[in-house]
Amino acid sequence: MCASSLAFIDGSVTNVALSSIEHSFGGSSADLQWTINAYALPLSALLLLGGAAGDHFGRKRMLVAGIVLFAIASLACAAAPSLPRLLAARGAQGIGAAMLMPNSLAILGNAFSGEARGRAIGTWASAGAIAAAVGPPLGGWLVAAVSWRAIFAINLPVSLAAIFIALRYVDESAEGEQPLDWWGATAATLALGALTWALTIWSSHHVATAPVITGAVAGLLLLAGFVLVEHRRGERAMMPLSMFASKPFLGLTVLTFLLYGALGGLLVLLPYTLIVGGGYSPLQAGLSLLPFSIVIGTMSRLMGRLTERIGPRWPLTLGPIVTAAGFALMTRLDPHAGYWIGVAPGMVLVALGMAGAVAPLTTAVLSSVDDRHTGTASGFNSAISRTGGLIATALSGAVIANQAGELVPAFHGAAVVAAAAAFASGVAAFMTLPSILGDRGPEGR
C-alpha cells in the first residue's frame, strides 16, 4: 500500500502545480500537458512489462527496484534546472511506477483469497484514495509556502517506509520462466508516444497539421505492429490476445478505459480551471479535490466486501452511471459562486459513483485470472486506466489553451464528454458482465 501510494500521490499532486511550473519555465499549453504525460506515458506503456517482469523475476524484487528508481527520479524532479530536465525525470518516475504498481497489487492478490481478497483490495484502494486525498492539499500548501519543487520531496519518506516494509515482511513470489516480451513493450511504448504527441499538438492548436497526421498514422501503425507481435507470441505475450475471447474481460477493459479517461481529464482540468479561471490558490484548488478521495477512501473497503457477495455487475453498472451524473452536474460549475455551491455538488456525486466502481473493478480483474497471471492482469488493467488518463490529458489542451475568461465554458464542454464516456462505461459493464464473475467457487479461483 505504501508503494502504490507513491503513484497515487504523484498522479494527483502535480495537477495543482501546473500553473506554478508554467511561471517558472514558461512554455505553451502543450508543455504543461507533457508535465503530466511524461510520467503517464511510460507508466501506461510499461505496466504490462512490469507485471510480467514481476511474475518472471520475482514480485518483491521488482517492487523494491521500482521504489528505488521512483525515489531517485523524485529527487531529480525537485532539482530540475529546466523543463526538459523535469520532463526526463518525470519519465523516470513513470518507469519506476510501472515496476511497482502491478507488483504491489499482485503481491496482495497472491496473499489473500475469497472474501479476504475483497477486503484486502478494498483496503488497498482506500489507502490509495487517502494518499490521493493528501496529495493535492499538501501539494498546494507546499507550492504556496515553499515551491513546486517541494511536492516531489514528499515521495521520499513514503519510499523509505515502503522499502523497509517490503524487505522486512514481504515474501518473494514468482511464476514461470518464459522470456520477457521486449518487442511488444517497445511497440506499445512507441505507439502510445506517437499517438499522445499527435493528440497533444492537435488539442493545443486545433489544426490537423502534417506533424499531427504523421504522428497519428505512425501511432496507429505501431499499434497494429504491437497486436501482430502479441499474436505471434501467443501465450508468451505480455498481453495474450486470447484474453479478449472472454466477454467479461473485454467489458472490463472498455469500462476501465472510458471511466478512467473521464476521471483523468477531470483531475487535470479542475484544479487548473479553479486556479486560472476562478482565482483559487493552489492550496484551495488542492482542497477542492478532498471530498472525492475521502468518499472513495471511506467506501472502497465496504464495496470490496459487497462485490465478493453479490458479484461485480451491478456495482460496475451503477457506479459509472452515478459518476456520469456527477460529470453532468459539473457542466454547471461556477468557481465564482463559492466552492460549496459551484463546485462541491458535482465533485461529491462523481466521488460516490467512483467509490462504487474502484474496488469492484480491481476485484473482478484479479478474480478473472489464475495465480500465475495476477501480475500480468493487474498490469494490463492499470495500463488501460492510465492510457485512458493519458489520452484525456493529451486532449485537455483544448481547454487549457483558452484564456481565463473562456476557460470555464471550455471546462463545461469537457464535462459533457466525460459524462458521456462514464455513462458508456456503465452500459459496457451491464452488457458484458455476469452477476457472478468466473463461477470459480468460493475461493475465486
Image: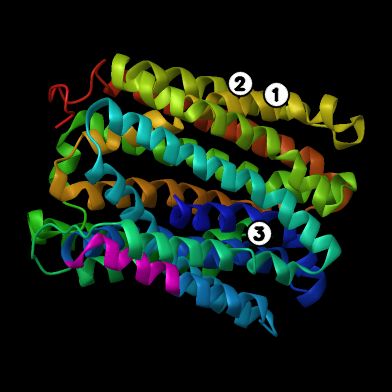
196 left or right, relative to 363: right
- In the rendered structure, which amino acid carries the disc numbered 2? Ala
Q: Which residue is mark 2?
A: 325
Say above or below: 159 vs 285.
below
Q: Which residue is mark 3?
A: 14
First of labels 3, 2 by sequence position: 3
Q: Is residue 428 visible?
A: yes
Q: Residue furthest front?
A: 168
Between the C-alphas of marks 1 and 2, the distance is 6 Å
Q: Are marks 1 and 2 in contact (CB under 8 Å)?
A: yes
Disc 1 designates what residue? 329
Percent position (x, y) of residue 285? 78, 46
Which residue is nearer to you in this view: 244 or 297?
A: 297
Residue 189 covered by magenta stretch: no
- Which one is earlier in the sequence, the residue at label 1 or at label 3? 3
- Quick one: SS at disc 1? helix
Task: Tell me which segment is drawn in magenta.
Answer: 57-68
